[in-house]
Amino acid sequence: MGYGLILAEGKKVSLIEMDVLKLSKQKDHYERLQLIHSSVGDLIKTHKPDCFAIEAPFFGKNVQSMLKLGRAQGVAIATAMHAGLPVTEYSPKKVKQSVTGNGNADKEQVWLMLQRILKLTSRPDYFDATDALAVAVCHFYQESNPLAGLTKSKGWEQFLQQHPERIVR
């Protein structure tokens, strides 16, 4: 399971850290879930992010793998929510579209674009890390979109509550 932490300052974004959680030493699936919980919690305590974005699970043919991935993501999401972070989920296609402009981009294309965006020189050992970093950059782009706040309202009443400065009296 990869993770990527970025710093957003205005329209600029820079890398804080990206890596993967080393889970292979734990043979028991439940011990891996505990390791995910403690590792994500430690990352949150250390870096104090203001949000948490994660890639939505994709549908695969192996049901057992999907179940394990869903559990792992659920633990990570629950850890972030327990820390009071808002959670946003993005489909793999949305992440690729946001970062590269092509929703069908391959992992290499995503990595090359991340290199350009973040001015990275060294290549990580695992694509899971770059996948997670791409989710972080996607979230930055989605949240920095001037229309981002406008699409979250479910009606005029909610919109006006969210934007009282737009009421003309």
Image: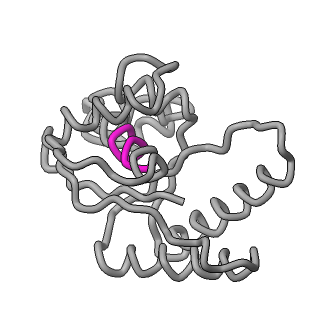
**Is 148 positioned to the left or the right of 10 in the image?**
right
**Is 89 positioned to the left or the right of 73 in the image?**
left
- Most foreground residue, 162 or 134: 134
**Rendered residue at 29%/73% (across/down):** 47
**Rendered residue at 65%/80% (across/down):** 26
Residue 88: x and y in percent read 51, 48
**Rendered residue at 52%/19% (across/down):** 104
Placement of 128 over or under 147, stated as above or below: below
Q: Is residue 40 in the magenta section?
A: no
The part of the image, by quadrant, that contains residue 17 is bottom left
Q: Which residues are magenta?
A: 132-138
Q: How is the image coloured?
A: one colour
Residue 119: x and y in percent read 14, 41
Quarter of the rendering occupied by the C terminus: top left
**Is 163 positioned to the left or the right of 33 in the image?**
left
Residue 137: x and y in percent read 33, 41
Q: Main secondary structure of the magenta part?
A: helix
Residue 102: x and y in percent read 43, 17
The part of the image, by quadrant, that contains residue 48 is bottom left
**Is 41 positioned to the left or the right of 100 in the image?**
right
Placement of 161 over or under 93, stated as above or below: below
- Most foreground residue, 53 or 65: 65
**Rendered residue at 48%/50% (across/down):** 128
Quarter of the rendering occupied by the N terminus: bottom right
Placement of 52 over or under 156, stated as above or below: below
Placement of 77 over or under 11, stated as above or below: below
- Most foreground residue, 130 or 37: 130
Q: Is residue 135 in the magenta section?
A: yes
The number of callouts visible is 0
